[in-house]
Amino acid sequence: MSLHVAFEASSPSLVLGPTLDALPSLEVALERQYALDPARPIAFCWTRCRNRKRLERALAADPTVARFDRIASGDDRDRYRLQRSETNVVGAYRQWVAAGGELLECRGADGRWNVEMRFPDRTSFGRYHDFLVDEGVSVELRRLAETDARSRRAGDPTLTDRQREALALAHERGFFEVPRETDLAEIAAQLEISNQAVSERLRRGQARLVESHVVD
């Protein structure tokens, strides 16, 4: 049994909180996150903003961001590598990892984060929820759903972060349209991986979705 959770969170002490408050039109999609140092995780995210210069001024002034680098640009969005600061920011990453949580999706807009996560059980999520509230974060629950082992068969069919990322980008760029509006090479270039790697992620992701939602 595991718990799927969807909630909204807002606070100027969450990473990028001040930037989201300063730019109501900003949209942020967290792509992935890792941490060699748990106190200073590094995040890769896509942003949409009407004024890139204004966004980068806001990032430079954001006390929750220690460093940012723009590493890719598309037609209407940019990809950034962000390192959070050691102070002036809620240490959410370390807390959800300690609670056994897994981040499934995280999007920022209108001054708040919309988050989907999976936890081992209600108790572990409760600890994480209480931590956020104690840190002054406004949390509004949207959904709590338990998933039993039978629905997962031999393994958990939920997409991995990398499969979700590849499928979402492929859908956005029209890879599944007829005729196709993009190809593997373009998706691979956006993800900075090989054509073979992106092909495998798409194939395995689709297989997991079929196993989860189609096969009886």
Image (cartoon, rainbow, N blue to C red):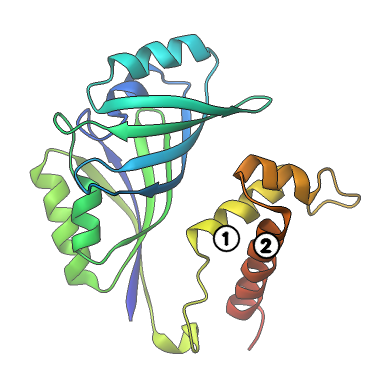
Residue 80 point in image, percent of width and height? 47, 30
**Disc 2 to disc 1, C-alpha distance:** 6 Å
Q: Are marks 2 and 1 in contact (CB under 8 Å)?
A: yes
Residue bearing the label numbered 1 = 163
Q: Can residue 29 be seen in this snapshot? A: yes
Left or right of 157? Residue 3 is: left
Query: Image height check: is 172 above or below 89?
Result: below
Left or right of 178? Residue 142 is: left
Left or right of 77? Residue 119 is: left
Residue 127 point in image, percent of width and height? 14, 61
How many C-alpha atoms fall within 10 Å of the one at disc 1: few (<14), some, or many (≥20)?
many
Residue bearing the label numbered 2 = 202
Residue extending furthest toward the left = 134
Residue 111 point in image, percent of width and height? 35, 28
In the image, what residue occupies the spot 43% across and 33% down?
81
Q: Amino acid at mark 1?
A: Gln
Q: Can residue 174 be seen in this snapshot? A: no
In this rendered view, identify the residue nearer to me: 162 or 207. 162
